[in-house]
Image (cartoon, rainbow, N blue to C red):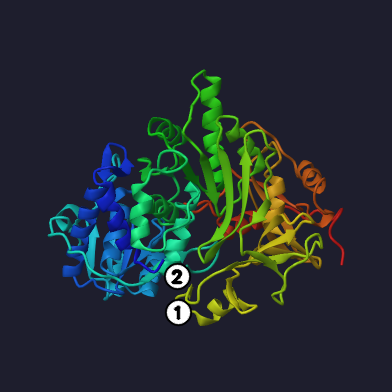
Amino acid sequence: MQENVATVLETVAGLRGDAPALRQGEDVRGWSELDERASRLAAHLAAGGIGPESRVAIGMYNRIAYVESVLAILKLRAVPVNVNYRYREEELRFLLDDAGAEGMVLGPELAERTAACLPALPRLRTLVQTPPLPGEPDAEPPPGAVPYADALRAAPLPYADRGDDHWLLYTGGTTGNPKGVLARHSWLFGVCAANGYRLLGRTPPASLDEVRTAVAEPAADGPPLTTLVVSPLMHGTGIYNTLGSLLVGGTVVLTESRGFDPAEAAGLAIGLGVTDFILVGDVFARPLADELDRAEAAGEPHAMPRLRRMSSVGVTWSAEVKARLLRHGDFVCRDIIAASEGGPFAIAETRRGETAVTSRFVLFPGARVIDSEGDDVVPGSGVPGLLAAPTDAETGYQGDDAKTAQTFRMIGGRRFCVPGDMATLEPDGTLTLLGRGSRVINTGGEKVFAEEVEQRVLEHPAVRDAVVVGVPDERFGHRVVAVVVPEPGASLTEAELREHVGAALADYKRPRGLVLVPEVRRSPVGKADLGWAVQAATETGAAPDRSSAPTT
């Protein structure tokens, strides 16, 4: 649909009225109130010089104000810029400069770092600071920043015609500087509709009239979506699922805790009748499974009768954790392969009573596994290929034509997004995910996909978390090392881990080093800090095991 997403959400708000759009603790934002507050914030930003195509950064923990800010910026035909709240001063300065940010809505958690960046960012002139979350400290606002409550005193911005404007999402990946994926609202609506309309078994609307009809009618399979989003809104998984629920007139629930509190999340899922639980891999799912197991053992099980789906995007979700979760409810575990650049590429759905798997998926319609020439990989051939999904003509990396040409390719007269995820196709057409091509470890001439080994390592009962990296080796170039967080009270040796991995994977894929750590450093969305992991694996000084090293 070509309509601006702000216009679609205004249409939904007109139909939903006082029905809840957002919940966070005792703070409940009805649809009409959400729309009015966003219009007031938009008017304040407009008075500060923000207009069509202006870039406005949003840097804060998950708050209702985050969603209000996104909608306010879209109302102005401006472009929201997601900011990782963990960025230090240098990283923050790079992103704000790269995006060309003219405005920023920030939480007090970023106030000091933002103030330090301002002298180097002359374009950044319109700032608004939100109050702290409950229990969090306040901070002195950066020079010139206006309190959020004051910004909302502006008269609401009148409704206006809008076009198919730009949308920008920065993706941090695991190495290097963040990259901005620049797209249009028509692309954004399509992505979010998959997290809203298609979940309800509906065809996404193609016009505002169809939006009115769809939102006014009750959902065919029960009440509208009530979506609990525990992953950060500054990440694609969080914001796209939030917008997906809102576009169908649903309710989005946010936790109050800064970090993930599984007991809080389970309580919200029960008390608010959550239908959809959005998380990111084992980094969220394992603590949740622990909490559900604990409550059941204590005779106080968490019953979630309305929960229909638990969905993860972007990070490995192990079979063992899926099976543990499904013991506690009759819902579907949806494991989706997608990227900030596009997708979805593939999905694995596991229901209660079915055998859970870690890395076996089914391609989405239109998605393919291609070789280096752009031809389809033959099922059952064992040849690793690249995941590719159809995309539009304009999506690409901001300011990087070379990287855009590498990732967005014309294949058979159609444009595809090919971000580098690799997989093999099984004889039955399902695919086995190998991981991102950038994480291939070349050891003695053999190529090892680090994420494939990680998935096997995580299946060991003594392993709670893990990341697999390649470290320099004088003979073989690199060797495979597992950086592991053991389960509490468990012991694990390198020999035991090698035997476990070798039972399913080729000998050259077995770890030739084991480093035990208290935790794996990860981003707020669960991606491992690979630089830290390589350093941890290198600094152990452990001698490489040559007993079964790969041969050339």
Q: Nearer the viewer, residue 25 or 355?
A: 355
Residue 300 visible from this viewpoint: yes
Give the left or right position of residue 287, taking residue 43 as reference.
right
Crowd rating for badge 1 (residues with CA inside 10 Å; few <14, some 14–19, many 20+):
some
Residue under circle 2?
180
Residue 168 visible from this viewpoint: no
Q: Are the residues flagged by discs 2 and 1 in contact, CB closer than 8 Å? A: yes
Q: Nearer the viewer, residue 359 or 138?
A: 359
Q: Which mark is residue 468?
A: none
Quarter of the rendering containing residue 330: top right
Give the left or right position of residue 195, taking residue 333 as reference.
left
Q: Nearer the viewer, residue 387 or 453?
A: 387
The amino acid type, in three-letter code, at marker 2 is: Gly
First of labels 2, 1 by sequence position: 2
Residue under circle 1?
399
> In this rendering, is residue 305 above or below 280?
above
